[in-house]
Amino acid sequence: MKKLILLHGALGSASMFDGLTEKLKGDFEVHAFNFSGHGGAPVNEEGFGIEVFAEELQAFITNNKLEGANIFGYSMGGYVALYLAASQPDLMSQIITLGTQLTWTAEGADEETARLNPETIKEKVPQYTALLKERHGKKQWKQVIWQTAGMMLELGDEPLLNMENLPLITNQVTILLGADDNMVSKEESENVATILPNGKFISIPNMPHPLEKVDFETLCETLKNCLN
């Protein structure tokens, strides 16, 4: 049975994949974990960001003897997987991303982080605040938001995936994007797919960006088609 590692996005956690795991476990040996600072996991002393999360993914693969596993990375999780594959393509097999912002600019990062203020979120979106508290802990949810904003600003200033290292990713990569995703550009996703040596782009009809609103039945079938 093929091994599949699921990687969550920014402000997310491994538990968000519970429903998807149920649908996939008949066809794959499914694994998931929380990046540091997420889902109640302690913040890594080395920092908070893509490079640290890539080290954590590498450690998870090595410690669990999952070398050669396939990777599905949602949003930030896809960026982490590709960043690691740029230096260690043999560590993983196929990589599938969904809703991953692959081209970062300072302007885009400013736009993204403008929405990442815990006090504003607490005031305007109390239901989401309650969800973040439950997901990351009452003491840590604000810190996760501030650090995520900082990570995005750093990516805007100095993107970690670029024209120099994208061609080094020799894995078969499928870039998925929901047709109703209003956070990630189809043009940029298609462009990166053409830069990757073994990349392809697939648009999924009627699929939005938030994982909570993604139809897992459709996503499950798409993943199975990509990996079989």
Image: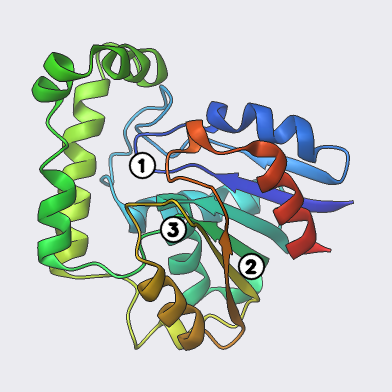
Q: Is label 1 in a helix, a strand or a loop?
A: loop
| 167 on left or right of 185 | right
Which comes sooner in the sequence, label 2 or label 3? 3
Which residue lies at the image location 71% right of the left edge and 55% below the top edge?
222
Q: CA distance from mark 1 to mark 3?
A: 11 Å
Residue that label 2 marks: 91
Q: CA distance from mark 2 to mark 3?
A: 13 Å
Task: Pick whichever, 215 or 139, lies toward us.
Answer: 215
Question: Residue 175's quadrant in the figure?
Answer: bottom right
Residue that label 1 marks: 10
Which residue lies at the image location 42% right of the left edge and 27% below the top edge?
41
Q: Is label 3 in a helix, a strand or a loop?
A: helix
As shown in the figure, which amino acid type bears the numbered disc 3? Val
Structural crowding at the residue carrying mark 3, measured as other residues with C-alpha within 10 Å and reported as few (<14), some (14–19) or many (≥20): many
Q: Is residue 209 above or below residue 194?
A: above
Residue 154 placement (x, y as % from top left) = 16, 59
Task: Pick whichever, 33 or 103, lies toward us.
Answer: 103
As shown in the figure, which amino acid type bears the numbered disc 2? Leu
Which residue lies at the image location 12% right of the left edge and 15% below the top edge?
123
Q: CA distance from mark 1 to mark 2?
A: 23 Å
* Front label number (1 vs 3): 1
- Numbered circle sitting on residue 80: 3
